[in-house]
Image (cartoon, grey):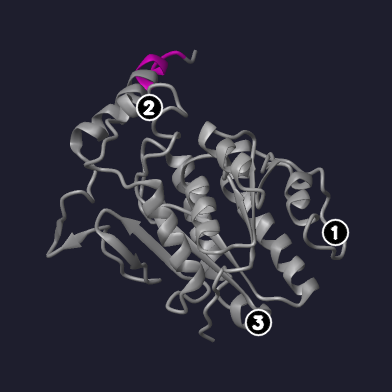
Amino acid sequence: MAWQFPIKDKIVTVTGGGSGIGLSYALLARKHGAKAVMIADLALTDEAQRAVDEDKNITFLRCDVTKWSDLQNLIDPYSNFWEDPEPIESNGYKHVAINVEHPIKLTRLAIRALLGKDKQGVVVIVASIAGYSKQYPAPIYSATKHAVVGFTRSLGDAQQLQGVKVVAVCPGIVTTPIWTTGTPGSGKRFGINDDVAITAETTAEAIHEAIESADYPGGTILEVSRDGTRVIPEWFIQPPGMVDGKMQKGTDVPPEMIAKALKPILDRTAAERGQLI
């Protein structure tokens, strides 16, 4: 069932919209005519605050995505539907809760809300190329992204059965605060620069395309890298940017960047060796 979903005059909610990719997409959504955009995050960057101050149709709601009650609050202002049967106080392991439980729970809340209003909708989950690659320096992060890639694929039939398209966008390294100012020293530590990273705006454009285009049905995993975009098939994929068995410039991770990422891990584990009695 192929259908387009223009966001003009639609309501858009962006978790993690206070900076980076989320903020870029929030601004892009308004540019493309979204009726209202709700930024849900713990805090706003200066740029996000200016957007809220200057556009009455962009609002901010403080949201801890690990708390189900906060996720419910994102739905309540615009939808009135049956009570969520799961315990609303349930919380869990923070890293997994943010990257896995939050998008899974919010997707379920969104489906319920849309069914309650008898409307169609689109849920875009921001995953990562780490969702189908190994990441020794960040195995938990990689595991969480694998989880949401699998979750998205599994919900492909929701477009036909419930009228809700669920897709995932998988960027590579993006110049967002998590790589620069968000984690002290991370930009220097990992050697992030414009030669290896894409912008949040580029990722936001991919999100917009995934929402509106009928070319990306439910269950689509859409990769965005310096090499452009591609749909990741369910089986037998090549690494990002692979051409004739070689990685294209700008799509692989430089050895010096890998070395910088590994050093603190190796230092820590070396210090732990032989310490147990």
Instruction: Answer with the quarter of the image where residue 155 lies.
Output: bottom right
> Is the Cβ of the residue at disc 2 closer than 8 Å to that at disc 1?
no
Seen from the viewer's position, the closer of residues 182 and 261 is 182
**81 displayed left or right of 26:** right
For marks 2 and 1, give the one nearer the viewer.
2
Which label is found at residue 24? Answer: none
Q: What's the distance in space between the residues labelled 3 and 2, CA to CA? A: 43 Å
* Residue 4 image position (x, y, % from top left): 52, 79
* Residue lying furthest bottom: 1
Task: Check disc 2 and give the amino acid type.
Answer: Ser
Dot 1 crowding, Cα within 10 Å, few <14, some 14–19, many 20+: few
- For the N terminus, the image quarter is bottom right
**131 displayed left or right of 245:** right
Up-down relation of residue 277 to residue 150 (above or below): above
Dot 2 crowding, Cα within 10 Å, few <14, some 14–19, many 20+: some
Task: Check disc 1 and give the amino acid type.
Answer: Pro
Q: Residue at x 38, y 22 (%)?
A: 185
> Is the Cβ of the residue at disc 3 closer than 8 Å to that at disc 2?
no
Span of residues in magenta: 269-275
Q: To which residue does mark 3 refer?
A: 161
Which label is found at residue 85? Answer: 1
Up-down relation of residue 141 to residue 10 (above or below): above
Seen from the viewer's position, the closer of residues 60 and 189 is 60
* For marks 3 and 1 on the same chain, the one whose residue lies earlier in the sequence: 1
